[in-house]
Amino acid sequence: MFFSVGVEMPANENEAYGLVVPALCVDKFGCVSAADNQDEIAVTVREAILMIADMMVKSGVDITLIKDAGPFVYAAHPDYAHCNQWVMVDVDLSALEGKQQRINISLPDALLERIDNRVQQPASGYRDRSHFLAVAARHELTEAKRK
């Protein structure tokens, strides 16, 4: 999942870059961190996101329902006026959903071929067939909750 990250630039060389992830600043949670230099921002914020998401799961929050409104929405919000820049960071939260289980399913060969062709496209974003099916299942379950 892509997360918008607000970056507060340091005022001098003795300060760190302040980082905030608004999509994870909900209820009793807040996702903030700091990085000593720009090269550390992505690594540092990924660690913070995974830590907060793990805490959310342990508290009973369904992390599949987390939505990121996007950097333009957050940049316009007064709570994030201190952020000088916005970046997007991709973090895979699927490992926090539980232990992987192998299943045996049957699909028509034409459908399986279409899935494999989609997965093999460089810009698809899918790691493999299982990842594709998990993303499709999450999407369908989310849509069912909305109805």
Image (tube, rainbow, N blue to C red):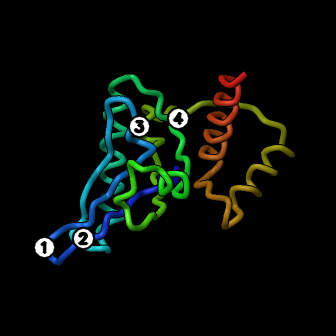
Q: Are marks 2 and 1 in contact (CB under 8 Å)?
A: yes
| Image coordinates for residue 33, horizontal then vertical, percent | 26, 54
Residue beneath disc 2? 10
- Numbered disc 1: secondary structure: loop
Residue with the most extreme front position: 78
Can you say whether 76 is above or below 12 in the image? above
Q: Earlier in the sequence, mark 4 or mark 2?
A: 2
Horizontally, residue 52 falls left or right of residue 86, namely: left
Three-letter amino acid code at the position of disc 3: Leu
> In the figure, residue 9 lies in which quadrant?
bottom left
Horizontally, residue 107 falls left or right of residue 137, namely: right
Q: Earlier in the sequence, mark 1 or mark 4?
A: 1
- Numbered disc 3: secondary structure: helix
- The residue carrying pointer 3 sits among few (fewer than 14), some (14 to 19) or many (20 or more) residues within 10 Å by Cα, namely some
Frontmost of labels 1 and 4 is: 1
Can you say whether 128 is above or below 100 in the image? below
Cα gap from disc 3 to disc 2, whole angstroms:
33 Å
- Numbered disc 4: secondary structure: helix
Residue with the most extreme right position: 110
Residue beneath disc 4? 64
Cα gap from disc 1 to disc 4, whole angstroms:
38 Å
Cα gap from disc 4 to disc 2, whole angstroms:
33 Å
| Image coordinates for residue 43, horizontal then vertical, percent | 32, 62
Cα gap from disc 4 to disc 3, whole angstroms:
10 Å
Q: Earlier in the sequence, mark 1 or mark 3?
A: 1
Residue beneath disc 1? 14
Can you say whether 68 is above or below 146 in the image? below
Frontmost of labels 3 and 2 is: 2
- The residue carrying pointer 2 sits among few (fewer than 14), some (14 to 19) or many (20 or more) residues within 10 Å by Cα, namely some
Residue beneath disc 3? 96
